[in-house]
């Protein structure tokens, strides 16, 4: 039978305020996460959102096949039953061998498919990606115009963390070598899948669930399709999942070295992607509740060290570029701009990124305060509209959430599938060209089924695995996903921003299915006894 993570070296401190807060934290996570994924599972059964590659960045909506989704869930349940049947007929040595072989095959597949996609898609980084690898390359040559007033790093100084790491990579691979970045993403995609496998091994040792995870993870096509994406998404996934694994290792062994690796992971997660602040907040919540209940100062100290080092790392990067370039560090685009974009409806998109504030910024002579004032006015006006017309607000936020969370591809092919007509693009008639064209609907259908299976598994996880006395450190990524959900509501959003949370769900979705199977078996045994 599946068992939640055991905590080594602690006695239960169940009484008093600390125990009450700990249980309350788990119950709140159970309720909120359950409600979120009940809604997401329902809509994933009924509707699908998607964006066609090569067309406008606008989310389209269509009815889904509930019968087909149910059939896929039945197949998934039958597959789990078959793996469980096999598990019971193998000894421990062969079970471990099955887990390792299936994990190895899964990782080899992800590596091979990702390398093929990187070289076959011929994706050429543009936009933010080009500024990342271009900025790193120019800085290596002593050219710092990206730091000019109105330049890319003047508006988005937090990108200097990723640029600095990219510059470090280019010291080895050579400037403008975005292919090296893509291959690093391939390695980290495989590493993320491996971390998910290790997370499940820490939580439980059930061969059926682990083998099921390896099968489902091999079908996580967005992870493969995002490997040519020269940005911080895949690196942030890897460091987040590594941090979760290290926390579970610490609970199992009580060794400080696991916390040290966790601190390192959190700092790098923050440097490669600013939205990793949600992960840091999740660790903060978990660390406080865990430290209070189990009187463990190490976890709290590790979190404080991670937060301090992340802040210090950014400060060090900013100072380094100030000294090298002579430009004073910019405060960047005010946060109110992202909040304002999060409430705007632009050309059929709900709360998605738009270029209006960039236009305001340049028209005002690169005045950040003038841009912030324009954003405050629009934000206040939209909130007043929502207050006067709650039904309009409800429709807006429903469309906003679904356009981000109910896209099975998370814009993976929209951003990374090049047209064969493009110079240097994939060959006409090739599979790589067809994935963004003739075969797009097929890929979308597969990912649609996968998303439905994962969302239902997450629903089971929140309802059945997040118990009042369960180890809160096991749920760090679950807290991150819930935090990401609420952040996607209030801030500017895209379906791409949800992709990291989707990859984080896989190990926990499989654990959720095992918990559901145990509940069914208990009812069955009670029925027989009666």
Image (cartoon, grey):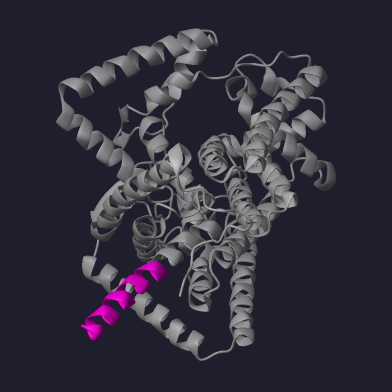
Nearer-the-camera pick, 312 or 381: 312
In this rendering, the count of numbered labels is 0
Specify the segment rendered in magenta: 513-530
Is residue 489 found inside the magenta-colored segment of the image?
Answer: no
Nearer-the-camera pick, 403 or 273: 273
Is residue 527 found inside the magenta-colored segment of the image?
Answer: yes
Is 44 situated above or below 369?
below
Q: Quadrant of residue 245?
A: bottom right
189 vs 496, left or right, is: right
Residue lying at 43% horizontally and 55% vertically, measured from the top left: 409
Q: Quadrant of residue 135?
A: top right
Q: Position of residue 210 (x, y in %)?
A: 53, 72
Residue lying at 41% horizontally and 29% vertically, measured from the top left: 354
Q: Position of residue 29 (x, y in %)?
A: 39, 46
Is 469 situated above or below 214?
above
Is 460 situated above or below 345?
below
Give the quarter of the figure containing the N terminus: bottom left
* Residue 178 at least partly seen: no
176 vs 215, left or right, is: right
């Amino acid at each position: 039978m599946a068992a939640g993570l055991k905590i080594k070296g602690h006695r239960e401190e169940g009484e008093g305020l600390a125990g009450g807060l700990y249980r309350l934290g788990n119950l709140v996570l159970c309720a909120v996460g359950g409600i979120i994924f009940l809604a997401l599972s329902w809509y994933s059964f009924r509707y699908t959102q998607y964006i066609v590659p090569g067309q406008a960045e606008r989310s389209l909506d269509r009815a889904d096949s509930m019968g087909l989704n149910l059939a896929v869930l039945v197949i998934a349940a039958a597959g789990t039953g078959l793996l469980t049947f096999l598990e019971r007929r193998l000894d421990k040595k062969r079970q471990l061998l099955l887990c390792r072989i299936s994990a190895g095959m899964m990782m080899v597949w992800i590596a091979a498919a990702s390398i093929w996609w990187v070289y076959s898609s011929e994706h050429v980084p543009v936009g933010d990606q080009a500024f990342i690898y271009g900025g790193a390359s120019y800085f290596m040559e002593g050219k710092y115009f990206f730091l000019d007033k109105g330049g890319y790093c003047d508006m988005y100084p937090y990108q200097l963390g990723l640029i600095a790491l990219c510059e470090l990579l280019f010291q080895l691979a050579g400037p403008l070598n975005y292919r090296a970045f893509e291959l690093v993403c391939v390695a980290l995609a495989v590493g993320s899948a491996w971390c998910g496998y290790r997370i499940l091994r820490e939580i439980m040792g059930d061969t059926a669930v682990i083998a099921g995870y390896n099968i489902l993870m091999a079908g996580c096509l967005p992870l493969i399709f995002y490997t040519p994406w020269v940005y911080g998404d895949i690196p942030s996934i890897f460091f987040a999942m590594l941090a979760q694994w290290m926390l579970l290792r610490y609970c199992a062994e009580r060794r400080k070295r696991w916390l040290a690796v966790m601190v390192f992971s959190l700092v790098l997660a923050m440097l490669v992607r600013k939205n990793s602040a949600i992960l840091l907040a999740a660790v903060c919540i978990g660390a406080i509740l865990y430290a209070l209940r189990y009187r463990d100062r190490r976890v709290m100290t590790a979190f404080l060290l991670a937060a301090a080092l992340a802040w210090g790392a950014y400060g060090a990067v900013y100072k380094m570029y100030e000294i090298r370039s002579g430009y004073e560090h910019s405060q960047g685009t005010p946060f109110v701009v992202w909040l304002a974009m999060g409430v705007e409806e632009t050309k059929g998109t709900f709360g998605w990124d738009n270029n209006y504030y960039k236009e305001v910024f340049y028209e005002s002579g690169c005045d950040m305060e003038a841009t912030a004032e324009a954003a405050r006015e629009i934000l206040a006006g939209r909130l007043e509209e929502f207050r006067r017309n709650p039904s309009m607000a409800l429709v807006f936020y429903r469309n906003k959430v679904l356009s981000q969370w109910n896209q099975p591809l998370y814009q993976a092919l929209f951003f990374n599938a090049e047209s064969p007509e493009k110079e240097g693009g994939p060959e006409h008639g090739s599979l790589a060209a067809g994935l963004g064209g003739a075969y797009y609907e097929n890929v979308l259908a597969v990912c649609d089924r996968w998303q439905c299976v994962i969302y239902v598994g997450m629903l089971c996880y929140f309802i059945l695995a997040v118990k009042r006395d369960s180890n809160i450190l096991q749920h760090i990524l679950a807290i991150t996903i819930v935090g990401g959900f609420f952040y996607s509501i209030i801030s500017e959003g895209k379906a791409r921003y949800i992709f990291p949370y989707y990859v984080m769900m896989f190990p926990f979705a499989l654990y959720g299915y095992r918990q559901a199977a145990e509940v069914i078996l208990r009812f069955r045994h009670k029925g027989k006894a009666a």
